[in-house]
Amino acid sequence: MENVIVEAIAAHVYFEWIHPFGDGNGRTGRLLEYYILMRSELPLIAGHILSNFYNNTRGKYYKMFEICKDQRGLSPFFAYAVEGFRDGLEETYEAVNKSQIIVFWQRVIYNTFDHLSHTKQESHKRKRKMMLKFPLYEGVWP
């Protein structure tokens, strides 16, 4: 897996250095990087992480190309990209984990109320609605 990430980043940087088109080199380089990542065993949800990172740090993204060109090496760009990939993976993990907890909580509430008799009663509907609005990520006590 690590080799694929290195290959994708290197292909991106080399494509940018070649700069074969008058316009669209950045988009094409990021697309090439994305393609290399997606043809590997990398989960689909992680494929967009580097491209998003570059877009969110656009100034530094361009600066890293200049630094690498001046130093005649890829190390600075690799350090920048791998750090962004790591941070993006952590953010994605947290978002997915939070979503799973919410879905699990909703399923618990619906399963609990489905097993009650007279589930269609207004009082059960209000209880279920109240439980679904329960703040999962906030403290209960003031």
Image (cartoon, rainbow, N blue to C red):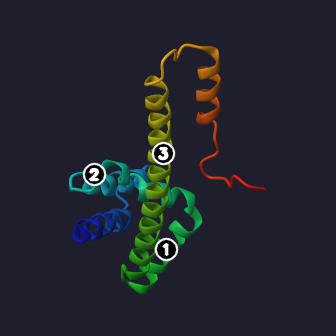
How much space separates mark 2 and mark 1, taking CA atoms? 22 Å
Pointer 2 local density, CA inside 10 Å: few below 14, some 14–19, many at least 20 = few
Q: Earlier in the sequence, mark 2 or mark 1?
A: 2
For the residue labelled by badge 3, is the local secondary structure a helix, a strand or a loop? helix
The residues tagged by marks 3 and 2 sit, at their Cα atoms, a distance apart of 27 Å
* Residue name at image x 34 percent, y 65 percent: 18
The residue most toward the front is 117
Callout 2–callout 1 Cβ contact below 8 Å: no
Quarter of the image for the C terminus: give it: bottom right
- Amino acid type assigned to the residue bearing label 3 in the image: Ser
Q: Which mark is residue 125?
A: none
C-alpha separation, residue under disc 1 versus residue under disc 3 = 34 Å
- Up-down relation of residue 102 to residue 53 (above or below): above
Question: What is the three-letter code of the residue carrying label 1?
Answer: Met
Q: How crowded is mark 1: few (under 14 residues within 10 Å), some or many (20 or more)?
A: many
At 50% from the left and 50% from the top, the residue drawn is: 98
Question: What mark, if any, has residue 64 been given in the picture?
Answer: 1
Q: Nearer the viewer, mark 1 or mark 3?
A: 3
User: With respect to residue 102, does 141 lie above or below?
Assistant: below
Give the residue at mark 2: 35
Image height of 119 relative to 59, above or below: above
Instruction: Say whether residue 7 is left or right of residue 131.
Output: left
Element marked by disc 2: helix
| Side of 24 relative to 124 (left or right) | left
Residue at point 59% right, 65% down?
59
**Circles 1 and 3: CB atoms closer than 8 Å:** no
| Sequence-first disc among 3 and 2 | 2
Determine whether label 3 and label 2 are within 8 Å by CB.
no
Mark 2 is on which residue type? Tyr
Give the quarter of the figure containing the N terminus. bottom left
Q: Mark 3 points at which residue?
A: 99
**Residue at the image position 46 percent from the left and 61 percent from the top:** 88
